[in-house]
Image: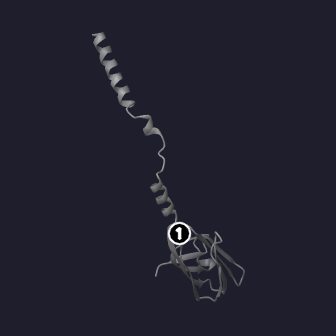
Amino acid sequence: MTKFVKGILAGTMALTLAACSNSSAADEQPKEETPAETAETETAEAETAVAAYKFTNNTGETVKLSVTNNEGKLDAFEKELKDGESASVEYGEVDASLSFTVLYTTESGREGKFETLHAEEANISLLKEDDMTGSTPLAFVME
């Protein structure tokens, strides 16, 4: 009986090892990209988006507004806005990976800065200090 049990255990062990070693070395090697896949990746990286923003000054003071492209590829936008006034900035279709910094300074000297504005179409409200719910000095407005 002991020989029988040992035989079954040896057979089970052999089957288990065979099942575990069923994958080939080729399956474990990293796959190289084909030229078509490389071109597809480059196309995906070159996606575009419309960068258009409407800023409304809701700070209660006149502000000096500046919008700059973080990569330095696009011209900066500068405008003075009285309380309640709006200004639109349109860069058109740009590389979707571009980002912008919005900076404004109020008459009283308070500075609002938002450094991660992405290429998108958005209505943005410049906030007075009392209306801020955190450290972000602006709010995206749904219209």
Q: In this view, does 79 lie above or below 32?
A: below
Query: Residue at image x 47%, y 54%?
Result: 35
Query: Residue at image x 69%, y 78%?
Result: 110
x, y percent for residue 81: 63, 87
Q: Is residue 37 above or below residue 140?
A: above
Location of the N terminus by quadrant is top left
- When asked about the image quadrant of residue 53, the answer is bottom right
- Figure coloring: one colour
Q: Horizontal placement of 21 versus 108: left or right?
A: left
Question: Relative to the observer, which residue lies in front, 4 or 70?
Answer: 70
Question: Relative to the observer, which residue lies in front, 110 or 122?
Answer: 122
x, y percent for residue 89: 57, 82
Q: Is residue 63 above or below residue 135?
A: below
Helix, strand or loop status at disc 1 = loop
Looking at the rendered structure, the kind of residue marked 1 is Ala
The residue positioned farthest toward the right in the image shown:
109
Q: Horizontal placement of 141 versus 80: left or right?
A: left
x, y percent for residue 40: 46, 59
x, y percent for residue 68: 64, 75
Q: Is residue 85 above or below residue 42?
A: below
Question: Relative to the observer, which residue lies in front, 143 or 71?
Answer: 71
- When asked about the image quadrant of residue 100, the answer is bottom right
Look at mark 1 in the image and give the residue it sits on: 96
- When asked about the image quadrant of residue 91, the answer is bottom right
Query: Residue at image x 35%, y 30%?
Result: 19
